[in-house]
Amino acid sequence: MRATISRKAHFNAAHRLYRKDWSDEQNDLVFGKCNNPNFHGHNYELIVNITGEISPETGFVMDVKILADLIKLHIEDEFDHKNLNLDVPEFKDLNPTAENIAVVIWRKLRNQIEIKYDLEVVLYETPRNYVTYSGN
């Protein structure tokens, strides 16, 4: 039997959406207020879904405590109260859109979670705007 477990997490971070190779006018046209040179912030909500076989021995798909610890160490500790453009190496040359943040989170966790599990990341940038990424 297969099931999905989920863990919610939260982090606050600032970012600026822009491309270094574009003019100020083009960045303003495409990214609007999100191109603020002084950055802007979000209260991100993260849901990590793990799908796998239910262990007949433990009754778990995966120990949620292990998942919680991985999210804290590799995501919350690295992203919380940071400027994504300046403080997170993955965004040195990658525009920190919600889509790209979700992919970076997925990659960080995929490296820590056994391949036998399916991994999906859902990242809420606002209560009404969110991205889902599962490695495809």
Image (cartoon, grey):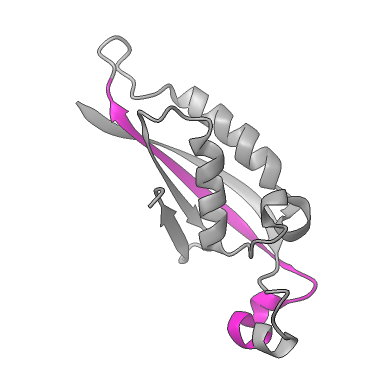
Residue nearest the viewer, comparing 12 with 38: 38
Image quarter for residue 94?
bottom right
Q: Residue furthest top?
A: 57
Location of residue 79 in the rendering, given as x and y in whole percent from the top left corner: 68, 47
At x 69%, y 77%, the residue is 35
With respect to residue 32, does 122 lie above or below? above
Side (left or right) of 64 relative to 75: left
**Is 45 one of the magenta-colored residues?**
yes
Q: Does 6 appear above or below 126? A: above
Confirm whether residue 106 shows in the render: yes
Question: Which quadrant of the structure image shows residue 27?
Answer: bottom right
Which residue sits furthest front? 21
Q: Position of residue 83 (x, y in %)?
A: 75, 57
Q: Of 91 and 33, which appears nearest the observer?
A: 91
Q: In this picture, is 12 found above or below 24?
A: above
Q: Is residue 125 visible?
A: no
Left or right: 115 in relation to 52? right
Coordinates of residue 81 in the picture (x, y in percent): 73, 50
- Rendered location of residue 10, percent (x, y): 58, 46
Q: Residue at x 35, y 28 (%)?
A: 116
Which quadrant is the N terminus positioned in?
top left
Residue at 52 percent of width and 43 percent of height: 107
Q: In front: 115, or 43? A: 115
Q: Is residue 12 magenta?
A: no
Snapshot quadrant of residue 118: top left
Q: Is residue 70 above or below residue 84?
A: above
Q: Give the mark count.
A: 0
- The region drawn magenta spans 28-54
